[in-house]
């Protein structure tokens, strides 16, 4: 029989409050997330591997009544080694006037939907090929981000504008030697269709210098439909998310490569702990002509609790033609300790 | 040449202009009065509908209240939809159950609201667990124990006496925000407390014959209700809080029900009925669906209805079991 009140608990008169008052709650919330992977692939001389994809730490706390801070040091797996870096570090205002919110530091930029989400939180093991071709590991940069909650009483609208120094972690942008900030704008529109379903439509545009000292322009459209019956939302849910990317990469003042890419995934919650996600992604390469890549995958997820999940599934990817296709079997185990905050809806 | 008055109610152009101006001024004044009266309402957003119900009792017509969660929804797992941020951005007050019950969704919404008034530590942020005498405060914490609440069991609103403390807390914060209405809030508070006391007598009388009755529950959310009304919850379908029922746990519960002749198993609106039905098929135990929040079922329109519904459902079931 499950013992849910054992010798470790006690009735109390206000001692819960006393615990809260004297505890070390001035310390930040701290969490650590482990991402372990294994795969089999039909491509290459070595067909399998098992490795730690990364460890993400998070320190989060209010600085004072005016702002909070987030730190994300990560250890990224590469060639069997774990290399440390700071993925994000920023402060964010809590209460500016006129429904504004300011962020400053190093952060995942507000491009589309999945760029702001840490990989371990995605319902798929590998990021879409379109995302990888356009943004590499992620579109992360250093600078300012100003968000405005548009005073629209009919539905949620948020406008985000960002000015950053020039992303060196993304293939399409670079730090400029000129006085040219990288600029981004994202408009998020969110509707509650009824109490069980929602629709989000986002539009993004970014412009900045690239590695050949010309301009790169990227546009994006993201559409997300979610259904989750309020009464039984721990047992059933459905999500359909699609993003399109369009880029213009100037190679010289007179030459540019235009490319596009997209992904679309559907995730269905089969039961309390089981999820199934099917994803298709197509991408041209923003820096190469006559190159296209496609991938289709299925991911089964077993979410033991909110703090641990196991995922596995097949993936078929092709480059240019089906003769360049590779089949993979993927496995991922994500686990969290500490007090990790909630992810965005 | 004099104008010909073809209409006895003929007015000159200047008279019409003056009348139009006066009409516009009067209408503007009227709308100003109306908008002033409307804006005098304190906008309150609560996490749960019971906090909303209590706030309506205490605040009366001085408050405009919105509850984020629905009464038939699992309060641990509310989706933090951006649309709630719009409500929070305009709120004068935000009321939370606290004790980390809403840790998975509420803090993110409040911090995204851009509303200084309702940030933690400010006058409009209300933790309804203030002054509550808590049960099941763990002396050691580990997630090995499941999804435990490290500050104590947070489902305290399921005790009407503690509900009076919640009302007291809300009264103090409303009075801080709107001191000119303090007398009204005090009157409403006393009326609320009096009604709780009167109805509590009635509820306890109904439950008196069943004091000490052993029952099974799906999740550990009834400890305050159990304490107040003299029940004894001897087991749960969840082997540990937040862990779905396992076959071995169900076998254990079935054995317990048979050995102790346990009459009822209580379930909540947002938990699956599959596991309770397995236990019922194997033991004959009666499944009673109780609401944990206002709005959990259509008949439960306010905080008083919550206990009325639950006490009636429980006593009816226990009487039937006794009769059989």
Image (tube, coloured by chain):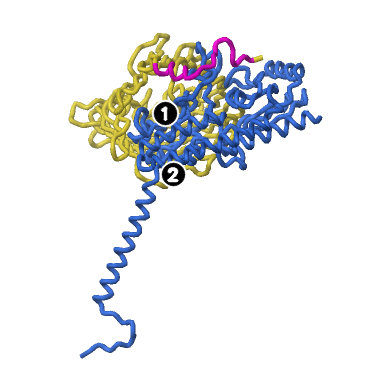
For image coordinates 34% across by 37% down, the residue present is A186
**Relative height, residue B180 to residue A44 (above, below):** below
For image coordinates 54% across by 13% down, the residue present is A9
**Distance from the alpha carbon under mark 2 to that under mark 1:** 22 Å
Left or right placement of residue A323 versus residue B11 in this view: right
For image coordinates 46% across by 36% down, the residue present is B46
Q: Which residue is mark 2?
A: B64
Left or right placement of residue A68 versus residue A117 in this view: left
Left or right placement of residue A136 versus residue B258 in this view: left
In this view of the protein, which residue sits in the foreground, B314 or A159?
Answer: B314
Q: Is residue A20 magenta?
A: yes
Left or right placement of residue B152 versus residue A272 in this view: left
Mark 2–mark 1 CB contact (< 8 Å): no
- Residue B184 seen from this side: yes
Q: Earlier in the sequence, mark 2 or mark 1?
A: 2
Crowd band around label 2 with a 10 angstrom C-alpha radius: few (<14), some (14–19), many (20+): many
- Residue A273 seen from this side: no
Q: Nearer the viewer, mark 2 or mark 1?
A: 2
Q: In the picture, which quadrant includes the N terminus of chain B?
A: bottom left
- Whether callout 2 and callout 1 share a subunit is answered yes
Q: In the picture, which quadrant includes the C terminus of chain B?
A: top right
Instruction: Say which colour chain B has.
Output: blue
Instruction: Say which colour chain A has.
Output: yellow
Q: Which residue is mark 1?
A: B107
Element at badge 2?
strand
Please, which chain is the residue tagged with disc 1 on?
B
Q: Is residue A54 magenta?
A: no
Q: Position of residue B107 (x, y in %)?
A: 42, 28
- Write the start and end of the magenta stretch as one range: A2-21
């Amino acid at each position: 029989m499950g013992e849910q009140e054992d010798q470790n608990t006690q009735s109390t008169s206000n001692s819960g409050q006393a615990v809260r008052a004297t505890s070390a709650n001035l310390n930040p919330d701290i969490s650590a997330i482990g991402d372990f992977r294994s795969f089999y692939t039909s491509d290459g001389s070595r067909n399998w591997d098992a490795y730690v994809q990364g460890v993400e730490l998070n320190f989060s706390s209010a600085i004072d009544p005016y702002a909070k801070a987030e730190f994300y040091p990560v250890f990224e797996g590469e060639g069997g080694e774990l290399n440390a870096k700071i993925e994000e570090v920023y402060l964010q205002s809590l209460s500016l006037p006129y429904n504004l919110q300011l962020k400053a530091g190093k952060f995942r930029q507000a491009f589309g939907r999945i760029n702001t989400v840490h990989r371990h939180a995605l319902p798929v093991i590998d990021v879409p090929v379109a995302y990888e071709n356009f943004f590499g590991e992620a579109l992360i940069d250093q600078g300012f981000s100003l968000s405005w909650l548009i005073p629209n009483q009919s539905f949620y609208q948020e406008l985000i504008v960002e000015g950053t120094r020039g992303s060196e972690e993304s293939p399409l942008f670079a730090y400029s030697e000129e006085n040219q900030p990288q600029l981004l704008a994202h408009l998020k529109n969110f509707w509650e269709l009824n109490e069980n379903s929602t629709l989000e439509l986002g539009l993004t545009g970014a412009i900045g210098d690239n590695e050949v000292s010309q301009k790169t322009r990227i546009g994006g459209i993201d559409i997300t439909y979610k259904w989750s019956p309020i009464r039984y939302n721990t047992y059933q849910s459905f999500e359909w998310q699609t993003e399109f990317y369009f880029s213009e990469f100037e190679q010289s003042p007179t030459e540019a490569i235009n490319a596009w890419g997209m992904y679309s995934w559907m995730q269905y919650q089969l039961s309390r702990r089981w999820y199934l996600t099917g994803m298709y992604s197509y991408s041209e390469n923003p820096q190469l002509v006559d190159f296209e890549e496609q991938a289709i995958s299925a991911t089964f997820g077993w979410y033991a609790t909110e703090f641990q999940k196991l995922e596995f599934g097949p993936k078929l990817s092709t480059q240019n033609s089906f003769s360049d296709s590779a089949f993979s079997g993927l496995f991922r185990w994500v686990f969290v300790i500490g007090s990790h905050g909630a992810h965005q809806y | 040449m004099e104008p010909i008055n073809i209409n006895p109610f003929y007015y000159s152009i200047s008279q019409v202009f003056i009348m139009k101006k006066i009409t516009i001024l009067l209408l503007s004044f009227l709308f100003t009065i109306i908008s002033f009266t409307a804006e005098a309402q304190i906008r309150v957003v609560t996490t749960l509908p019971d906090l909303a119900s209590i706030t309506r009792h205490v605040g009366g017509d001085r408050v405009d209240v919105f509850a984020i969660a629905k009464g038939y929804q699992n309060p641990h797992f509310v989706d933090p939809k951006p649309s709630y941020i719009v409500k929070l951005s305009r709120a004068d007050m935000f009321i939370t159950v606290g004790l980390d019950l809403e840790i998975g969704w509420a803090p993110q919404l409040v911090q995204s609201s851009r509303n200084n008034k309702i940030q933690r530590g400010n006058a409009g942020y209300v933790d309804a667990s203030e002054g509550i005498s808590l049960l099941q405060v763990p002396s050691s914490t580990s997630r090995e124990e499941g999804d435990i609440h490290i500050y104590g069991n947070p489902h305290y609103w399921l005790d009407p006496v503690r509900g009076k403390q919640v009302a007291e807390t809300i009264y103090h914060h409303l009075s801080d925000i709107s001191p000119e209405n303090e007398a009204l809030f005090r009157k409403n508070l006393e009326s609320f407390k009096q009604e709780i006391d009167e109805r509590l007598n009635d509820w306890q009388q109904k439950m008196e014959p069943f004091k000490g009755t052993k029952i099974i529950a799906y999740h550990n959310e009834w400890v305050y209700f159990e304490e107040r009304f003299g029940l004894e919850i001897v087991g749960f379908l969840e082997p540990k809080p937040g862990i779905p029922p396992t076959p071995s746990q169900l076998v254990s519960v079935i054995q317990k029900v048979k050995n102790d002749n346990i009459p009822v198993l209580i379930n909540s609106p947002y938990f699956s009925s599959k596991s309770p039905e397995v236990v019922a098929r194997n033991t004959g135990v009666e499944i009673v669906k109780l609401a944990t929040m206002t709005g959990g079922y259509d008949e439960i329109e306010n905080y008083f209805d919550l206990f009325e519904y639950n006490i009636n459902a429980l006593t009816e079931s226990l009487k039937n079991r006794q009769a059989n």
